[in-house]
Amino acid sequence: MPLDALCISAVREELSGQIVGTKIDKVLQPERDVLILNLRGRNEAFRLLISAGSADMRVHLTQHRSENPITPPMFCMLLRKHLTGARLLSISQPPAERILEFVLDAPDAFGVTSEKRLVVELIAKSTNIILVDNEGIIIDCLRRVGGDLSEKRSVQPGLKYKKPPVQEGKTDPLDLTTSQWDEIFASNKPESSVDKWLLSTFSALSPLICREIAWRAYGACDIKLNDICDGGAALKRELFSIALTARNSGFEPWSINDEHNRPRDFSYTQIMQHEGTLDVLRAESFSEMLDAHYTRAAQSERLRQRASSMTKTVKTARDRIQRKLITQKADLEKSAERDYLRECGDIITANFHLMKKGQLVLTAQDFFAEGERRIALDPLKTPQQNAAKYYKGYTKAKTAEKYLMQQVQSGTVEVEYLESVLEAIAMAESETDINEIRQELVQMGFVKEKSQKGAKVKKPSAALPLKFMSSTGMQILAGRNNIQNDNLTMKIAARSDIWLHAQKIHGAHVIISCGGSEPDETTLSEAAAIAAYYSSARLSGKVPVDFTSVRNVKKQPGGRPGMVTYSGFKTIIAIPDEATVERLRIYLK
């Protein structure tokens, strides 16, 4: 990962100059492994993001606002108890380690202050956030480790905090001397590539920086040690140059973007190895760079990965119903031939006097069409019995048609519903959204509830819709999933409110709470933009959005959650602009 120990050191220095001395105003935990500390200074407020996710571990200031769960997690409530009102005294980092320690002066319930440390370990596969008291005892941690899970170190409340074991066999490049270099380089393996040798020999360096050192020294990232002919002089020069930059705090935030201006990588020094194939841009700050690198799009991608099992379940159910629909539609087409069976029965009945038992075929005048009709007969049956067989086939086909039409209609509704669930999963913004969708699938019978013997089933909290405030001060609400759409339209909204929905596609129900008055054009336009953004046409340029009074919206008879019919509507063309949606959105605190 590019966030190596030296990059963390650069972030630490930047944060120390901005937030040391501020007080913690609020602690939030929008996701399982993400903390947000709202900090307040004399003239400015900050939002410090701490992520302990294995794929996106980091610490930086953020401008991005996340939706928080209705009920805070236990670890969040514990941190609120111990850290609300605490003053940040310093931020420290053990040498060449991916660990940050936030030293705090925290008051207790009686107003007595004592030193506490919030330790953030940004170590792959063992990331953690640990609260430690003034005696070094662990108060609690995000991930408890102990027993069979860890032979070397236990992380549990009540235990003495111990730092993770230092990497053995690696040298800190910041403390490297010339004599040490000569000794280490002399023992290298010539068949190894320069960048891999650097990575395995020295601590605090990421693969990106190791490749950059190799490129700066020899103009190639994949050059092998046995192909260099200067005895490692250029390699030594560039490694010592990086170390000098770190010792002198010469860090600079550089972002690496692809041809579509999407962040690909980042570093604390200018990266030149891409030679123009990627854009290397100087950022304003490390926090701005990291905030841009881990955008909401990246968060949505991670959420989709977490929801992959749910997506697979929904797609499996949808595909199974679609296969059944193909068979039912084919049978329905066959049932359309029932009139032919009735006609054959009528022709047989009209020709009883010409027939005899044992006859295989009846050729008779076809009084339903011009010419003659050949009708196959059962030789073991009498003429009357053959006619009865055709009439029975007609009656059976007629009944089957009615039943199959019901089944096709029901199956089509089910497929439509499951498609809307897939859209809701794709647009989920938090784990809370994913959990609510799963609960919806449980209620609809597509997913089985996990049961534990003796455990009480906790009823989930009532889902709250997304909230927005228009530029002219009107409240706008939007459902996150089908059940929320139902609750919003059928229970929360007043009959005189305005209802909006993207035309003929899956999307959120959007309500303008206008109290019986007509919404102004600005509010209507902004609400339509919200409806377009929270729909399956989010990536389109322009989206037609229908709007009408809530009283004109009816729940579809026998339909799944979120399925409605509406009348008396008008249509407005909206642009699903994310910037507009974010500007209007009110986040749950």
Image: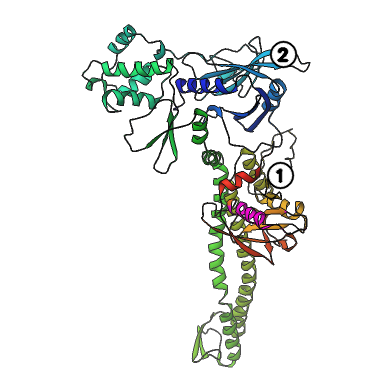
The percent coordinates of residue 21 (x first, y second) are: 63, 19
- Magenta stretch: includes residue 523: yes
- The foreground one among 94 and 161 is 94
The percent coordinates of residue 73 (x first, y second) are: 68, 30
Q: Residue at x 65, y 24 (%)?
A: 41
The tag on residue 554 is none
In the rendered image, the quadrant that contains the C terminus is top right
Position of residue 383 relative to residue 177, above or below, is below
Q: Residue at x 64, y 70 (%)?
A: 402
Mark nearer the viewer, 1 or 2: 2
The percent coordinates of residue 288 (x first, y second) are: 51, 32
Q: Magenta stretch?
A: 513-532
Name the residue carrying label 1. Answer: 464
Question: From where the camera sits, is residue 522 visible?
Answer: yes
Q: What residue type is labelled 2?
A: Thr
Q: Quadrant of residue 211?
A: top left
Q: Magenta region's main secondary structure?
A: helix
The tag on residue 113 is 2
Is mark 1 in CB contact (under 8 Å) with mark 2? no
Is 168 left, or right, of 272 in this rendering? right
Q: Is mark 2 on a helix, strand or loop?
A: strand
